[in-house]
Image (cartoon, grey):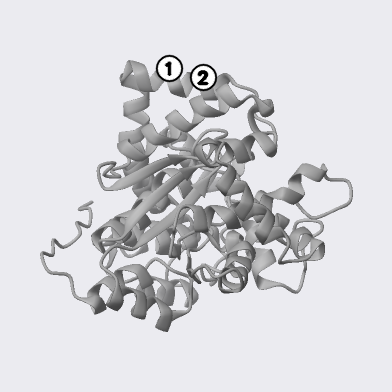
Amino acid sequence: MKKRTPEKVDAMDVEKRYRLVRDIAEEVIQNDELKKLLEEKDHIIAYDGFEPSGLCHLPFGIYRPLLLKNMVEAKIHFKLLLADSFAWVNDKMGGDLEKIREVGKYFIEVWKTAGVDMNKVEVVWHKEHFDDPEYWKKVILISKNHTLQRTIRSLAIAGRVGTEGNPAAYTFYPSMQCADIFHLEAEICQLGMDQRKVNMLAREVGPKLGWFKPVAVHHHLLMGLEGPQQLEGFDEESVLDREISSKMSKSVTETSIYVHDTLEDIERKINKAYCPPETGPEENPIMDYVKEIIFRAFDKFVVERDTKYGGDIEYEKFSDLESDYYQGKLHPLDLKQSTALYIDNLVRPLRNHFERVRSANELYQFVKESEVTR
């Protein structure tokens, strides 16, 4: 399995930088604004934010680093926001800020081990914002410029459905995240599709308040192993709400793959996964991982098969594999078995690191043993 290595470029032109950013996006709002930003500015800041809680899974430990490589290669200054105070508001790790901070250190260790060049990204702890009066001025100004109804609709960013039974503290969440964008001076919001609503809010209120209008570069949400879902309280007619409902959740052990899983764990979970024949990545989590992870990380995907079933078959493009699968030329079991091997190839270095390096293992054991609340 030969891993794909990014091309080294000395003088990066705008079109190449644009393609690198566009390649990781399910949608860009707006493409022309992104191009203009790349044309006019050398130093561009992008960000993504993460609440420290729980063990790291494929979307965080494997997929996110693959996307970050593109952003770094495109010479974007990327800020990784460890949202410790958000996790406190959202009652993660029992609302214990010290425990939350330890999980944040574990997150950094995962990124480093997964190949993120920590010299080329900037880690920011949200508590620095939380203690800054200027940040809270931004929060209040933003909250004065949108409605309570809009706030409730945006609570999906926190993994919450907007209901009257939620603590009032949750209503601060969208305005706080929106304020982060301007406090970080992040002209590109490079987050998942589940953060779309708050990024759209930032695009609306920024110009109203005399600030900038950020470009939203939303990446795909990897599907959980159980396949398409519809969470209670989300709009059944909304494609976005369905994607959010179906995303891999690290709190559901058997439908999530972790960076600490053994090959046996990965094979067991994938063998049990929803994988109907003749379906594409929109309806099939295994096809989703092949498209979004394997073809980003490797030059080709080899499906190993017994000679009586035609022998091994090699794919250099996802579209060719997808065509064969739609036509029934590729069996779900063969797809699953090969996918498990490739996923393990990516997970193994992280698993080994956290088993063998004492300081990393201590962080892992702390997170593993801590009570995780949602």
Query: Residue at left 53%, top 24%?
Result: 367
Residue position for label 1: 362
Number of residues whose C-alpha sits closer than 10 Å to that of mark 1, classed few (under 14), some (14–19) or many (20 or more): some
Query: Residue at left 56%, top 48%?
Result: 134
Q: Which numbered marker is on residue 50?
A: none
Query: Residue at left 40%, top 20%?
Result: 361
Residue 312 can be seen, yes or no: no
Secondary element at image label 1 = helix
The amino acid type of the residue labelled 2 equals Phe
Query: Residue at left 50%, top 37%?
Result: 128
Q: Which numbered marker is on residue 366?
A: 2
Mark 1 to mark 2 CA distance (whole Å): 6 Å
Q: Quadrant of the C terminus?
A: top right
Dividing the picture into quadrants, the one containing residue 143 is bottom right
The amino acid type of the residue labelled 1 equals Glu
Image coordinates for residue 60, horizontal then vertical, percent: 46, 46
In the depicted structure, whether residue 293 falls above or below residue 109: below
Q: Which is nearer the eye, 104 or 143?
A: 143
Task: Point out the residue furthest to the right here.
Answer: 164
Image coordinates for residue 7, horizontal then vertical, percent: 16, 63
Image coordinates for residue 293, horizontal then vertical, percent: 39, 57
Q: Are marks 1 and 2 in contact (CB under 8 Å)?
A: yes
Q: Which is nearer the eye, 239 or 47?
A: 47
Secondary element at image label 2 = helix
